[in-house]
Amino acid sequence: MSLSLLFIIFFFFFIGSFTSSHGAGSIAIYWGQDESEGTLAQTCATGNYEFINIAFLNTFGNGRNPKLNLAGHCDPDAGGCTGLSKDINSCQAKDIKVILSIGGATGDYSLSSKEDARQVALFIFNNFLSGKSSSRPFGDAVLDGVDFDIEQGNGAHYDDLARFLSSFSSKGKKVILTAAPQCPFPDAFMGIALNAGVFDNVWVQFYNNPQCQFKSGDARGFSDAWEQWTTEIKTTKVFLGFAGVAGRRRNWVRPGGGAEVGGAAVDQEV
């Protein structure tokens, strides 16, 4: 998922047949990598989305000082992102889940061991979830979970990281775990982690991979990949992921009525 990609749309389906017309209704997006996309509060105010992934924490692990990159929105190193606390609380008041996305297509991240994964999990818990830290980038806002958009390295120990984060769930506050693998199955970076059985949502990136991306008039590769993703991983919900900005990708969609793709109502431009 490119840092320059402003907006990804994920349409939700309960696990089942690609051709099923049941279970559509939830939409998730990524926010944070293009200052022209508007504020977080404005995005939530559209009423279109159930999940918003704040992207990205793209430096972490193996002794690195974790860093948040929100492009032109704010500078976390200078304490300039604490104002997002109000926006996050506003979104959550609308029953929108706000999630921290880690990784991304560019950045500097990896996990060297199980202990390294534990330390990264503790950092995320204390700085973004319900833990305590004097350096919380979003102030007192408590995010709802963590998204794994892992696109580099060897994929080692992300299963450990997911389990550690899941263990922070409490009776009153569950830590939602999501992942954004690319559509070729199994995913090169998240295949092992996805088998851990702790992810709640998996939004599969059905773009940038000709063999399985959605293409108007030829859905064979897309359909075959969808069948694999919905039958061979341990998760409750699988989403279809498409590029959501005109001009950024050949195949893109936007929320709204229109053609049906796997049971989801979308407007498509190809």
Image: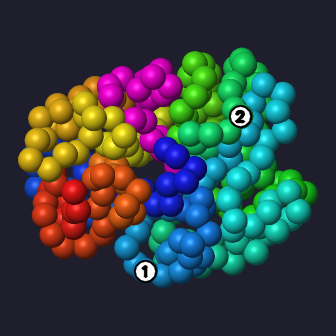
Q: In this rendering, would 90 be left or right of 261?
A: right
Alpha carbon distance from label 2 to label 1: 33 Å
**Which numbered marker is on residue 46?**
1
Q: Which residue is mark 2?
A: 108
Using the image as rendered, state which of residue 173 and residue 85 is in the foreground. 85
Rendered location of residue 219, percent (x, y): 13, 41
Q: Is residue 169 visible?
A: no
Residue at screen point 48% across, 28% down: 190
Q: Amino acid at mark 2?
A: Asp
Q: Is residue 159 visible?
A: yes
Rendered location of residue 231, percent (x, y): 23, 30
Quarter the C terminus occupies: bottom left
Residue at screen point 72% across, 45% down: 124
Q: Which residues are magenta?
A: 171-197
Is 168 situated above or below 142?
Answer: above
In which quadrant of the rendered view does residue 32 lie?
bottom right
